[in-house]
Image: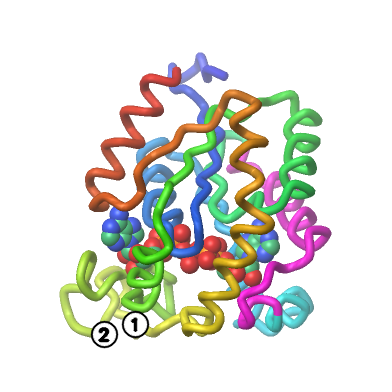
Amino acid sequence: MVNHDRGIKIMRLIILAPPGGGKGTQASRLSDQYNIPQVETGKILRQAVQEGSQLGKDAKSYMSSGNLVPDEIMIEIIRNRFAEADCQAGFILDGFPRTLQQARALDKLLDEQEVELDAVIYLNVPVAVIQERLSRRRVCSDCGATYHLDTKPPGQTGICDSCQGELIQRSDDREEAIEQRLKQYSSKTEPLLEFYQDKGVLLEIDGAQSISRVESAIDTALTESQ
Ligand code: AP5
């Protein structure tokens, strides 16, 4: 859909990838580029855990063991988030949908709003690369910014460039939890590739390249798809 007032295309995107595949890294950049909110379900859940809310209490054990939080909870989160004004200008979904039930619920929500997805960006990243990325990832305990000790290091060791918060390792970036997250991805999330391929909106990107090459590949694929 085109916003004729400003001549800017409203983008409604999903970014799909295995755990640690680079969803957050690319979604944050696309959010700035298209001036659309990044709807990051993992971050929403982590904030709820930190605040000790009922949602956080319900989600905590699923997350720390590397399992998916139940569909009903996730669908409700997205329904509420979509009701906020900023999502009228488009969105980039980072971490949702993750199951066929979530994807069908999203279809229903979009139908209700009489809008369509522009693209589902799929970052294809092999398991060996993922394990290395997650074990070397550090996140800011205050603002959630993501770093990698080798490919995206902070200016000052252990300190966030944006807010000077402390950099920590996520509790689900332990070996056992990573293994479980990968199992969940292959059994529950991978079927979405065919679901979106059949709808003709899937854009497959080689996500094992450097961050800047992945950025360029996404930009090219989005331009060509319009
Ligand atoms: P979530 O936070 O979504 O975790 P995830 O899917 O495992 O994804 P990550 O955040 O770990 O990785 P990413 O793909 O964003 O990669 P990143 O950019 O950080 O969800 C956490 C948990 O919440 C789930 O396990 C589940 O329990 C629950 N949950 C959330 N949504 C749910 C839903 N819809 N349904 C049910 N449960 C849900 O990159 C990783 C690292 O690699 C970083 O260090 C980064 O700097 C580096 N890097 C990125 N790109 C590159 C590159 N191209 N080259 C080199 N390094 C790179």
- Horizontally, residue 79 falls left or right of residue 43, namely right
Task: Give the residue number, with chain letter if any, for mark 2.
Answer: 158
- For residue 198, what is the image quadrant? top right
Classed neighbour count for the residue bearing mark 1: other residues with Cα under 10 Å, few (<14), some (14–19), many (≥20): many
Q: CA distance from mark 2 to mark 1?
A: 5 Å
- The question of residue 57 being in magenta is answered with no
Q: Quadrant of the N terminus?
A: top right
Q: Residue at x 59, y 41 (%)?
A: 193
What colour scheme governs how the chains and residues are painted in the rendered image of this protein? Answer: rainbow
Residues 207 and 2: in front is 207
Q: Amino acid at mark 2?
A: Gly
* Contact flag, marks 2 and 1 (Cβ < 8 Å): yes
Looking at the magenta stretch, what is its main secondary structure?
Answer: helix
Q: Amino acid at mark 1?
A: Leu
- Secondary structure at badge 1 equals strand
**Where residue 80 is drawn, which disc sits there?**
none
Q: Which residues are magenta?
A: 62-87
The image position of residue 185, as x and y in percent, is 60, 60
- For residue 82, what is the image quadrant? top right
Task: Give the residue number, with chain letter if any, for mark 1.
Answer: 167
Residues 39 and 185: in front is 185
